[in-house]
Structures are given as C-alpha cells and as structure tokens.
Amino acid sequence: MNKNLESKICIYPSAHKFGGSVIAPPSKSYAHRLIIAGALSDRSIIIKNISQSDDINATIDVLRKMGAKISWQRKNFADTDKKNSNRVNTNNNNEKCINIHNKDCININNKNSITIHDKYNVINSCDVLIEKNNFLENLVKLEDNTEFFCNQSGSTLRFCIPLALLSDKTVYFSGEGRLNNRPIYPYFSVFEDMGVKWEYNNKLPLKLKGKLKSGDYKISGDISSQFITGLLMALPLCEGDSTIKLTSDLESYSYVDMTIDFLNRFGINIEKTSYNEYKIIGNQIYKLGVSPYEKSTVIKENLQNQETLQNQKILKNQEMVDNTYIAKKNIIYKNVDIIENEGDYSQSAFWAVAGAIGKNPIKIQNITKNTLQGDAVIFDILEDMGVNIKWGDNCVTVFSSNIKNIDINVKNCPDLVPILAVLGTAGDGVMRITNAHRLRYKESDRLNAIATELNSIGADIIEVEDGLIINGVLKNGIDKLKGGQVNSHFDHRIAMSLAIAGNLCDKPIIINYANCVNKSYPKFFEVYKSLGGVLEVL
C-alpha cells in the first residue's frame, strides 16, 4: 500500500440493522503455502478459492520472478447479474479477474482501491493456475543480483528466502513499510551453518549468497513460526536428510501443523521426532495426492474417459480479457491437479465478534470446526465468554449475547488480539490478554495501536509489556463509545477491528488509511456494507 495515497472511510452507527450472512474469505495462510507448493509440484495445478490480496500477489510475484508460471483464472459465481457481468476488478499487478458486481461501486484510488457494491454473499476470489514448467531448473538459472520485492508480506519474505537459496546465486530481498524492520535474524544461525553469506543492516534489503544444503539446524521458534515453515518447504528438495531443532518454545505452533498438513497433501513427508525437533527426508518430490486428514478438500481429476479437446495444452483454448488468460466455458484441463483452499478463520473473527456484540445474528459460511487454522479458537473463546454459537453444515452462526470477560493467552493466536480488544470493550468485567509480545513487530505495534485508537473513542484499555488489560465499558448494552477520528496505523487488522468497533459508537468514526485492508481482505468493506453497515468513502 502506498502511504501517500491516503484513504478515509467514515463508519456510521448501524448496529440496529447490522447482521445477516457472509462467506468466509479464502484463507491467506493456506494460500501462501498452496501456491508455493503448486510452483514446486511435478504437475500443473489449479488452486481454487484464492483472494487477490496484496500479500498473495506479493508471493505470486516473487515466484514468477523465480521462474514459476502462474495466472489468475475466472471464478464462477453461482449468483450473477447479467446487466453488470462485464465489470472488472483490477488487482495490483494490472491483471484482471472478471467478477459479478452490482452497479454501486466506489473506488478510493487507482492502485489501492476499496470496491463497494450491494451484492450479498459475493466473495471476490479467483482460481490460480500454476503450470508445470521446470520451476527448480528455472530457479537454478536465475540471474545474479535478482531482487525479490515482498511488499509488506512477512510470509512472502520468510517463506521464499530458503527457496531463493536453492539457486546458489546472489539475491536481494526488499520490502515496504514495516516489513523492512520486521525480524529475520532467526535465519542467521542457519545461514552460518550452511555457509551462506549475508548482508543486512538491521532492515531490508537483505543480500544473500550461497546454497541451501541439508544438515542439522537449530533455530528459535519464539519470534515467528514462519521461519520453520520456510525451511520445512525447501529442505525436502535438498540431496540429503535434515533436522530442525527448536531452541525455544514454538509460538503459533498451529501454523507449523498447517504447513505439515499441506506438505502431506503434496506427498512431502515431515516427521516430528519430538516436541521440538523435525526430521526432513531429502530428494522428495512435490506431488499432490489424497490428504491423510478428513478435512482436506482435495480433488483429483480423472479425465481419461472424458471427451477432451483436440489440443490439450493448458492455455490453448483460452481467450484474452484485458491481457489476462480467462478459461472459456467447458474447457477440460488434462493432467491438472485441483485443490480447494479453505475459508479464513482469522478474517471470520471480525464477523463473529460483530455478531456477538451487535443486535442481530451473523452467519459465517464456508468454515467448519475441522481445521488446523489456529485462529479457529475464536469460537471457543466466544463460547467461554458466554456467547451463543450454533454450528451448521459448513457454517456457524453467532448470536448477540451478554459477554463475560475472561483472561486469554494468545501465544498461539496473536492475530486475534485487535478484535479481542473490541470484544473485551463490549464485555462485562476485565479481559486480560497475555503472551502477546510478538504483536509489537507486526504491521504495526498492534498492542499500542489498538489500545491507543480504542481509548481515543472511549474504551478503557491499559497497555502492558506483553499484553492488554481491557476494562469492559459497555456491559449494559446501553452505553456507547463516542466515535471520532482514528488511525489504522497502516495495519489491516487494526483497520478492520476499528470498523467493527464503529457499531459500538453513538457517532461516526473516521478510519484513516482504510485501504490497508487490501493487504489481506480487499473486499472487507464491501462485505461490511452487505451486512447493513453504513459507510462513506471520504
């Protein structure tokens, strides 16, 4: 996001009518992993249900520069509007994915736009086609001094560093905003053991020269699980076997479990030999297969007995739409694996809390209890706080409830803290959030950011070294926050949390730099409006 392109959204109080049904956006955490695995796969692959967010585009851009052949494919919507079927939503790479919109569209700016329309239950997701094209051979042919720009995506940076080392070339990693200062030093001990040389002046760019090698490596797990994921994805491609031993407790362990899950889907075997050690067999091949987990949505297409087109080249029978290949109707892809991404529980948390603190229930579709996503714990937290929740078939409904504040250890779900602060403000009693120190190194210092902004509109939050003490101030359901102007701190989770807090206010709130939601959830404000929220782009 370009910070010079300021965007403001005014949220008007609308709690009395805010409610309804939403579709959970695609999981960003799984999407990063699936796209990387797809690039490494021995076959072409279509990944269904991917959001064109800034972070996902960053990963795709880096992989393309490494030699992957990746294209966005049209999403087939069940609910269409023929009158507006030609409306196009542009992502940051000037690629376009056709979507079905109503005519009420508002853009904040050209590059970092927030699109708002009146269509209910339309999720702006696309499918991603990754063609088999000898990605690893292309990586070895990489030119010296290639620069990989990761925008503001920590996942892109930390996941792709080990991949780049497979090239044995001099490479640079750069970024924008807070990413330039986010920690990457846990990799340095691994670099030293591998003989990789690096130059780093406490901020990006990072210069690397050397080869990823198998071996026994020790790494800290208390800064981010993303470093472990990066190694787990790349080390199976090395010639020999490797081990990873954690030198500290692993924070957000569920994300490593998620990584091992998707690696299993692609035929990569990772053995957890103890609570802090992983064994990785070398010379493995990424090949999509049937997942050992019941929850996996993996579809293997058997097309041998189907009528196929005469020329089976994947892109042969596609049409060009605004410089993007879009599959024609009834195209049958041969020798292409298909896998479908899950719904995102981190983003669903915003709607779940909105249902709990609001006047009307909110139903969230495309999520189930059976997931490895750590932030699914939001529903356990809500139930522990007295919130009425009803699970259905591939959906959950959250009802307006009397909220009782509790103590919450967020060691394994730190991304929930901003919206939990909103929840605690609406609850009865005191909420203590602990083990949240890592939030000071995210897109913003999230502990300071959410405490500062909510306090500015009438909350009572005390910031401590590793967490927050939140005194509920709206326990009777009558009192309101006062509204006013707040700052997103260029942080998507802060902006979305403040938008949900807008329904607790008796006056409008204005969110500065609201377009930062494009980092993870470009359609957030569109969905907000579909639920009855009233907002205005200033």
Image (tube, grey):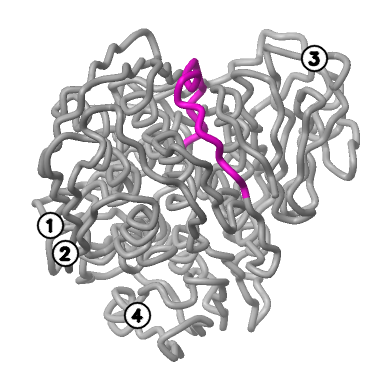
Would you name the residue on which mark 2 appears? 246
Would you name the residue on which mark 4 appears? 191
Residue 372: say if magenta. no
Q: Please tell me which of labels 4 and 1 falls first in the chain.
A: 4
Q: CA distance from mark 2 to mark 3?
A: 53 Å
Residue 25: say if magenta. yes
Q: Is residue 422 visible?
A: yes
In this view, 172 is above or below 255: below
Q: Which amino acid type is shown beneath numbered disc 1?
A: Asn
Point out the stretch of residues depicted in magenta: 9-27
Q: Are marks 1 and 2 in contact (CB under 8 Å)?
A: yes
Would you name the residue on which mark 3 appears? 81
Disc number at residue 376? none
Residue at 66 percent across and 66 percent down: it is 2
Residue at 34 percent across and 22 percent down: it is 295
In this view, 515 is above or below 246: above
In this view, 169 is above or below 148: below
Q: Which amino acid type is shown beneath numbered disc 3?
A: Asp
Residue at 31 percent across and 85 percent down: it is 192
Q: Position of residue 473 (x, y in %)?
A: 23, 41
Q: Which amino acid type is shown beneath numbered disc 2?
A: Leu
Residue at 44 percent across and 29 percent down: it is 289
> Could you say which quadrant of the image residue 101 lies in?
top right
Q: Are marks 4 and 1 in contact (CB under 8 Å)?
A: no
Disc number at residue 276? 1
